[in-house]
Amino acid sequence: MQKENRVSLRLENQVALVELNRPEKHNALDLEMFHAIVAVQKQLAREKTLRAVVLSGSGVDFCTGLDIKSIMKNRSGMLRLLWKWLPWQANLAQQVSVGWRRMSLPVFAAIHGRCWGGGLQIALGADFRYVEPQASLSIMEGRWGLIPDMGGTLALRELLPRDHAMLLAMSAQEFNGTRALELGLATAATEAPVETATVAARQLAERSPDAVAAVKRLCRKSWKNGSGRALARETAYQIRILTGKNQRIAVRRQLGDDIDYKRPSRW
């Protein structure tokens, strides 16, 4: 268990199972939850044997967003959420989403029940989103006269046309998991998101951690850049992989050798 029991963490077969753990409040985000999520992110970054992360929520909902009563009555806590030394850095509120993007590990979000506001921002930080067809999703901040400010915009601009992203954020409309898949916000719709995401995570755990990390970094950095930079990164990353041990191990594993991968390179 982590800070104030707000987040639980289990490590199984090189996969980290991270669960938002405030079910009595539908995993609503108070200041302790923000700190707990960031603490888990930092802990996972130090675990060199990990190969993937599955993020889910306990109870009936993934996360219903900000705990408005808790946050609003703690003005100093609100300032701590928004404070940053430099404008282009992530503050505490943004780190709970952006922190998953910055990991070299692939991160899967398993969404069930309600995934509103800050909950959706957290899920948007994952690389993959497996969602129940009947789940309820919303960029809910507009109902409170706010804008989404937890880093999810980074994923929205990658996943959606601009007009769709603006309409969802302005209207704060709710949509189900099936619609999320149609929009491109979900990787897959499934009745068992945690189980399906865990199977997918374990499949990636069988691949070279260097190649998996390089693909994530390549796509994050090159998706919106010019073709020249993307081609240059492909070549540079491939050379780096070819000079490492894990690529040769991947070949041996394909040929039937039972051999473990070495500690992955830092990307």
Image: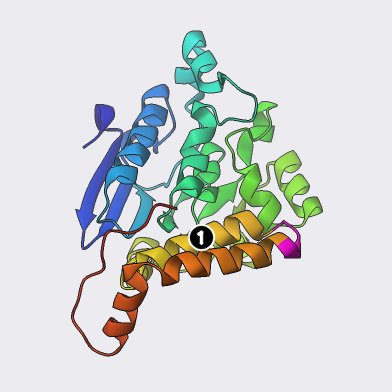
Q: Residue furthest right?
A: 163
Residue identifier under label 1: 216
Q: Quadrant of residue 4?
A: top left
- The secondary element bearing badge 1 is classed as helix
Q: Amino acid at mark 1?
A: Lys
Q: Is residue 58 visible?
A: no
Q: Residue at x 22, y 50 (%)?
A: 10
Who is closer to the viewer here, 85 or 251? 251
From the viewer's perspective, tell me whether residue 208 is left or right of residue 140. Answer: left
Residue 239 counted in the magenta span = no
Image position, residue 78 (x, y; %): 52, 16
Q: Is residue 254 visible?
A: yes
- Determine if the magenta segment contains residue 226: yes
State the predominant SS element of the stretch in magenta.
Answer: loop
Tell me the magenta residue range: 224-228
Spot the residue most to the bottom: 255
> Would you place residue 187 above or below residue 62 in this image?
below
Q: Quadrant of residue 22?
A: top left
Residue drawn at point x = 49 percent, y = 52 percent: 126
Q: Position of residue 263 (x, y in %)?
A: 27, 59
Q: Give the percent coordinates (x, y) of residue 258.
A: 18, 81
User: What is the quadrant of residue 37 in the picture?
Assistant: top left
How crowded pointer 1 is (Cα within 10 Å; few <14, some 14-19, many 20+) is rated as some
